[in-house]
Amino acid sequence: MERTGNAILRIAEDNGPGIPKADRKRIFEPFFTTRRATGGSGLGLPIIMSLVEAAGGTLSLDDT
């Protein structure tokens, strides 16, 4: 498949509580979660990161 361009997805605002500064460096680590008590496995973002990188892309969290 030939790549013809780039895409940037930027979420500028949401209604969530945000990500605490202490957790920002770890959110893409497998099994890291702040929601274990409510069923979080810590695999969502690592899986997305893997898929994006496999397609030749990058994924990052920017400070706001």
Image (tube, rainbow, N blue to C red):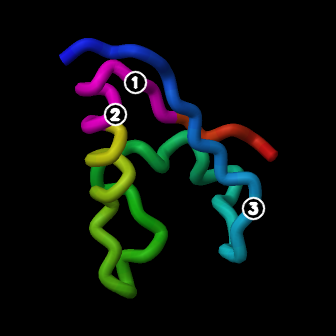
> Regarding mark 3 in the picture, which secondary structure is present there?
loop
* Residue at (39% x, 15% y) in the render: 4
Q: Position of residue 33 (x, y in %)?
A: 41, 64
Judging by the rendered image, the residue that carries numbered circle 3 is 13
Choose the circle earlier in sequence order: 1 or 3.
Answer: 3
* Residue at (33% x, 61% y) in the render: 42
Comparing 25 with 52, the one in front is 52
Comparing 18 with 33, the one in front is 18
User: Looking at the image, which residue sits at the far bottom?
Assistant: 38
Comparing 7 with 18, the one in front is 7
Stretch of the chain drawn in magenta: 50-59
Choose the circle earlier in sequence order: 2 or 1.
Answer: 2
> Where residue 11 is drawn, which disc sits there?
none
CB atoms of marks 2 and 1 within 8 Å: yes
> Regarding mark 2 in the picture, which secondary structure is present there?
helix
> Where residue 57 is drawn, which disc sits there?
1
Local crowd size for mark 3, using a 10 Å CA cut-off: few (<14), some (14–19), many (≥20): few
User: Looking at the image, which residue sits at the far right?
Assistant: 64
